[in-house]
Image (tube, rainbow, N blue to C red):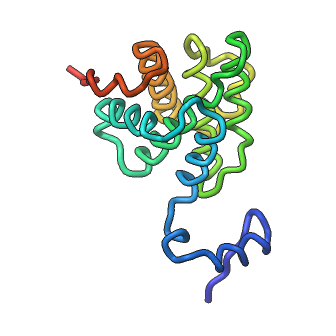
Amino acid sequence: ERLIFSGTGLREGLLFDQLSPSVQKQDALLAGCKKIAHAASRFDDLTAFETLFRWMKPLFTDQGDSFNRLLEASCLLSDGGWTEHEDYQADHAFQRTLVMPFYGIDHAGRAFLALSQYVRYGSGFEPEKEITRPAQQLLDRRMADLAVTVGLAQRLGYLLTGGALGLLRQTELKLE
Protein backbone atom coordinates (compact mmCIF):
# COMPACT_ATOMS: atom_id res chain seq x y z
CA GLU A 1 0.00 0.00 0.00
CA ARG A 2 2.91 2.36 0.67
CA LEU A 3 6.44 2.23 -0.76
CA ILE A 4 9.21 4.66 0.22
CA PHE A 5 12.58 4.96 -1.49
CA SER A 6 15.49 6.49 0.36
CA GLY A 7 17.91 8.49 -1.74
CA THR A 8 20.64 8.03 0.86
CA GLY A 9 20.13 4.45 1.94
CA LEU A 10 18.44 2.28 4.51
CA ARG A 11 20.72 3.32 7.37
CA GLU A 12 19.54 6.95 7.19
CA GLY A 13 15.90 5.82 7.11
CA LEU A 14 16.42 3.78 10.25
CA LEU A 15 18.10 6.73 11.94
CA PHE A 16 15.23 9.00 10.88
CA ASP A 17 12.77 6.68 12.62
CA GLN A 18 14.73 7.14 15.86
CA LEU A 19 14.52 10.95 15.79
CA SER A 20 12.02 12.75 17.97
CA PRO A 21 8.74 13.69 16.27
CA SER A 22 9.65 17.39 16.47
CA VAL A 23 12.91 16.81 14.60
CA GLN A 24 11.17 14.59 12.04
CA LYS A 25 8.77 17.45 11.28
CA GLN A 26 11.56 19.91 10.46
CA ASP A 27 11.95 20.91 6.84
CA ALA A 28 14.91 18.82 5.69
CA LEU A 29 16.12 21.41 3.18
CA LEU A 30 16.02 24.34 5.58
CA ALA A 31 17.54 22.33 8.43
CA GLY A 32 20.41 21.31 6.14
CA CYS A 33 20.92 24.85 4.89
CA LYS A 34 21.00 26.13 8.47
CA LYS A 35 23.69 23.59 9.31
CA ILE A 36 25.71 24.65 6.27
CA ALA A 37 25.22 28.33 7.14
CA HIS A 38 26.57 27.74 10.66
CA ALA A 39 29.62 25.97 9.29
CA ALA A 40 30.46 28.11 6.25
CA SER A 41 29.33 31.66 6.94
CA ARG A 42 30.83 34.52 8.91
CA PHE A 43 27.87 34.75 11.24
CA ASP A 44 27.54 33.14 14.67
CA ASP A 45 23.76 33.01 14.44
CA LEU A 46 21.25 32.81 11.67
CA THR A 47 19.36 36.04 12.33
CA ALA A 48 21.36 37.80 9.59
CA PHE A 49 19.94 35.40 7.02
CA GLU A 50 16.42 35.80 8.41
CA THR A 51 16.85 39.56 8.05
CA LEU A 52 17.97 39.15 4.44
CA PHE A 53 15.02 36.84 3.72
CA ARG A 54 12.48 39.27 5.21
CA TRP A 55 14.10 42.21 3.38
CA MET A 56 13.89 40.45 0.01
CA LYS A 57 10.43 38.93 0.43
CA PRO A 58 8.49 42.02 -0.81
CA LEU A 59 10.03 41.46 -4.27
CA PHE A 60 8.25 38.13 -4.50
CA THR A 61 4.77 38.71 -3.07
CA ASP A 62 3.12 36.89 -5.97
CA GLN A 63 5.07 33.67 -5.34
CA GLY A 64 3.83 30.79 -3.21
CA ASP A 65 5.11 28.87 -0.22
CA SER A 66 7.34 26.55 -2.26
CA PHE A 67 9.14 29.56 -3.72
CA ASN A 68 9.49 31.19 -0.28
CA ARG A 69 11.11 27.97 0.94
CA LEU A 70 13.68 28.19 -1.87
CA LEU A 71 14.19 31.89 -1.14
CA GLU A 72 14.86 31.17 2.52
CA ALA A 73 17.25 28.34 1.62
CA SER A 74 19.09 30.61 -0.82
CA CYS A 75 19.45 33.30 1.85
CA LEU A 76 20.91 30.73 4.26
CA LEU A 77 23.49 29.76 1.63
CA SER A 78 24.29 33.34 0.61
CA ASP A 79 27.45 33.74 2.70
CA GLY A 80 28.99 30.35 1.98
CA GLY A 81 31.49 31.64 -0.56
CA TRP A 82 32.84 34.60 1.36
CA THR A 83 36.31 33.04 1.81
CA GLU A 84 36.81 32.41 -1.90
CA HIS A 85 38.87 34.68 -4.11
CA GLU A 86 36.57 37.09 -5.98
CA ASP A 87 37.69 35.75 -9.35
CA TYR A 88 36.30 32.30 -8.48
CA GLN A 89 33.47 33.01 -6.04
CA ALA A 90 30.61 32.72 -8.52
CA ASP A 91 31.82 29.49 -10.15
CA HIS A 92 32.70 27.84 -6.83
CA ALA A 93 29.44 28.88 -5.17
CA PHE A 94 27.50 27.49 -8.14
CA GLN A 95 29.36 24.18 -8.24
CA ARG A 96 29.32 23.71 -4.47
CA THR A 97 25.60 24.40 -4.21
CA LEU A 98 24.82 22.13 -7.14
CA VAL A 99 26.41 19.11 -5.41
CA MET A 100 25.75 19.80 -1.72
CA PRO A 101 24.13 16.92 0.15
CA PHE A 102 20.71 18.53 0.48
CA TYR A 103 17.58 16.62 1.38
CA GLY A 104 14.01 17.62 0.71
CA ILE A 105 14.67 19.20 -2.68
CA ASP A 106 14.34 18.14 -6.28
CA HIS A 107 16.80 18.71 -9.12
CA ALA A 108 15.10 21.88 -10.30
CA GLY A 109 15.18 23.30 -6.76
CA ARG A 110 18.87 22.51 -6.49
CA ALA A 111 19.49 24.20 -9.85
CA PHE A 112 17.55 27.24 -8.63
CA LEU A 113 19.73 27.51 -5.50
CA ALA A 114 22.94 27.04 -7.48
CA LEU A 115 21.99 29.67 -10.04
CA SER A 116 20.96 32.16 -7.36
CA GLN A 117 24.33 31.73 -5.63
CA TYR A 118 26.17 32.09 -8.93
CA VAL A 119 24.47 35.44 -9.51
CA ARG A 120 24.88 36.49 -5.86
CA TYR A 121 28.67 36.17 -6.20
CA GLY A 122 28.95 37.17 -9.85
CA SER A 123 28.60 40.52 -11.49
CA GLY A 124 25.48 39.46 -13.31
CA PHE A 125 24.12 36.57 -15.29
CA GLU A 126 25.26 35.51 -18.71
CA PRO A 127 22.91 32.84 -20.09
CA GLU A 128 25.51 31.57 -22.54
CA LYS A 129 28.01 30.79 -19.75
CA GLU A 130 28.89 27.10 -19.92
CA ILE A 131 29.08 26.52 -16.15
CA THR A 132 25.43 27.45 -15.58
CA ARG A 133 24.04 25.46 -18.49
CA PRO A 134 23.09 22.39 -16.37
CA ALA A 135 20.98 24.55 -14.08
CA GLN A 136 19.39 26.40 -16.95
CA GLN A 137 18.33 23.12 -18.56
CA LEU A 138 16.50 22.11 -15.39
CA LEU A 139 14.63 25.40 -14.93
CA ASP A 140 11.91 26.96 -17.00
CA ARG A 141 12.46 30.59 -18.01
CA ARG A 142 10.32 31.96 -15.17
CA MET A 143 12.23 30.08 -12.45
CA ALA A 144 15.58 30.95 -14.02
CA ASP A 145 14.58 34.62 -14.01
CA LEU A 146 13.50 34.34 -10.37
CA ALA A 147 16.83 32.73 -9.43
CA VAL A 148 18.67 35.60 -11.11
CA THR A 149 16.50 38.14 -9.28
CA VAL A 150 17.16 36.40 -5.95
CA GLY A 151 20.91 36.44 -6.57
CA LEU A 152 20.91 40.10 -7.59
CA ALA A 153 18.84 41.10 -4.54
CA GLN A 154 21.20 39.20 -2.25
CA ARG A 155 24.16 40.88 -3.89
CA LEU A 156 22.53 44.26 -3.34
CA GLY A 157 21.84 43.46 0.31
CA TYR A 158 25.47 42.52 0.94
CA LEU A 159 26.77 45.55 -0.97
CA LEU A 160 24.51 47.97 0.91
CA THR A 161 25.56 46.62 4.30
CA GLY A 162 29.13 45.50 3.75
CA GLY A 163 27.99 42.09 4.97
CA ALA A 164 26.44 43.42 8.19
CA LEU A 165 23.00 42.21 7.15
CA GLY A 166 21.35 43.44 10.33
CA LEU A 167 21.53 46.91 8.81
CA LEU A 168 18.88 45.83 6.32
CA ARG A 169 16.31 46.29 9.11
CA GLN A 170 16.77 50.04 8.55
CA THR A 171 15.84 49.78 4.86
CA GLU A 172 13.14 48.21 2.75
CA LEU A 173 12.66 46.92 -0.75
CA LYS A 174 9.39 47.53 -2.52
CA LEU A 175 8.07 47.43 -6.05
CA GLU A 176 6.51 50.63 -7.37
Side of 66 relative to 170 (left or right) = right
Figure quadrant of the C terminus: top left
Residue occupying the point 73% across, 31% down: 95
Q: Based on the displayed image, in which of its 4 quarters is residue 50 positioned?
A: top left
**x and y percent of residue 171 in the render?**
27, 21
Q: Residue at x 40, y 45 (%)?
A: 68
Residue 116 makes an appearance in the image: no
Q: Position of residue 81 (x, y in %)?
A: 65, 26
Q: Give the total number of marks visible in the rendering.
A: 0
Q: Residue furthest bottom?
A: 1
| Viewer-side residue, 16 vs 66 | 16
Q: In terms of depth relative to the viewer, which is nearer, 100 or 127?
A: 100
Check the image and report above or below for 65 versus 147. Answer: below
Q: Give the image quarter of residue 87.
A: top right
Is 2 situated above or below 25? below
Q: Is residue 1 visible from the viewing direction of this image?
A: yes
- Residue pushed farthest front? 44
- Viewport quadrant of the N terminus: bottom right
* Residue placed most toward the observer, 73 or 35: 35
Residue at the outermost left position: 176
Left or right position of 120 against 90:
left
Pinpoint residue 150: horizontal percent, then vertical percent.
Answer: 46, 28
Residue placed at 37% from the left, 34% from the top? 51
Q: Residue at x 46, y 13 (%)?
A: 159
Q: Is residue 153 above or below residue 66?
A: above
